Amino acid sequence: VPEQALDRDCTTLSRHVLQQTVKTRNAPSLLSPEAQDISAIMNRIALAGKLIARRLSRAGLMAGVLGFTGEVNVQGESVKKMDVYANDVFISVFKQSGLVCRLASEEMDKPYYIPENCPIGRYTLLYDPIDGSSNVDINLNVGSIFSIRQQEGEDLDGEAADLLQDGHKQIAAGYILYGPSTVLVYSVGDGVHSFILDPSLGEFILAEEHIKIPEHGPVYSVNEGNFWQWEESLRDYTRYVHRHEGYTARYSGALVGDIHRILLQGGVFLYPGMLNKPEGKLRLLYESAPLAFLIEQAGGKASTGMNRLLDVVPDKLHYRTPLIIGSPKDVQLVESFIQDHAKRN
Ligand code: P6P
């Protein structure tokens, strides 16, 4: 077997994270508490990903996996059985971790506290357990999005006020894409790295290090069904890409797959604000901020249209913002339409 293949087989996620954390956090050695912590947390996230991937691969064959629970979540969205399963998987894999004291998820009104880990728990996991779950029943790609923040203070009132800080406070962020293969993409602040799950090994194996998003790409990814709900600036942007050669529309209805395409091929993903919902749909703390952290680490940009996404400070856990994210040149083009309109009005 060529040397290269052997080396790749040996670069598992846990080894890579340790190396990365040491480089990024100026940790003195692989044995520093923080390097070990982040590596252990990433391993738990990988375990959650494996459990979710396995369930998704059998969803059509097992009773009780597809379809809706009949409940409505804090977002006002119908809850899919897979949403509940995936949410609980993350909680259960972290219960035994000893590291994470709180989990804040799109599916839960309040954070979930792991009492045996609190208050010493040093970290909080913010996550969207299954993003794009409407795709589950039609066997299209879905994803999990995660973000790790340091626990600050005791949070004795359960309000998790220390989580209401900007995206620069993230220690690590990434996503798991459940597609033809299961891909985990993460960053601890020193570039973006991807891993592919080898089901025969049960390991995420390094696929690509220091992924760089193209400066410009052909893809614009947006739900044009909302066209008449947008501000005029976004409609003008859409007319521009319709008229100019070299643009192509790609939109799957599941954020992680759309972002992964933009990361690898370049272009821009947009979920703008709308006339009746100026804040848009996507949640800051466990969707936009982790993806913004990652895309900036890959050399891209992430914006609300008016501000850098990572600078946004939420005033509540389920805070939403418009999101424009992807290749620098393509994000700047959208921002130019928005800001030119703002100047004129
Ligand atoms: P729309 C899925 O519900 C999600 O949160 C993202 O995964 C996706 O990008 C977006 O909403 C799709 O929303 O309004 O275009 O169906």
Image: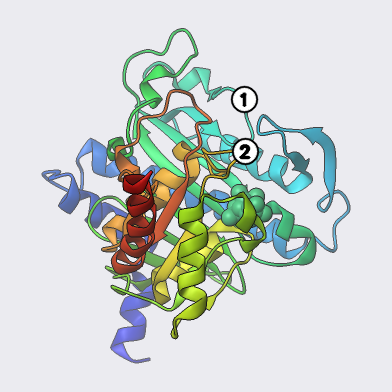
Question: Which numbered marker is on residue 276?
Answer: 2
Locate residue 240 relative to residue 109 in the image: left or right. Answer: left
Question: Which numbered marker is on residue 47?
Answer: none
Foreground of the two, 113 or 250: 250
The residue sitting at the bottom extreme is 2
Question: Which numbered marker is on residue 109?
Answer: 1
Q: Nearer the viewer, mark 2 or mark 1?
A: 2
Of callouts 2 and 1, the N-terminal one: 1
Task: Write the residue at 31% across / 57% down.
Answer: 301
The residue sitting at the right extreme is 63
Locate residue 206 relative to residue 70 in the image: left or right. Answer: left
Foreground of the two, 271 or 167: 271
At label 2, the amino acid type is Asn
Secondary structure under tag 1 reads: loop
At label 1, the amino acid type is Asp
Task: Write the residue at 33% across / 53% down.
Answer: 340
Q: Position of residue 98 (x, y in %)?
A: 43, 29
Task: Write the residue at 38% across / 39% down.
Answer: 148
How crowded pointer 1 is (Cα within 10 Å; few <14, some 14-19, many 20+) is rated as few
Secondary structure under tag 2 reads: loop
Q: Position of residue 19 (x, y in %)?
A: 23, 56
Quarter holding residue 117: top left
Locate residue 324 relative to residue 69 in the image: left or right. Answer: left
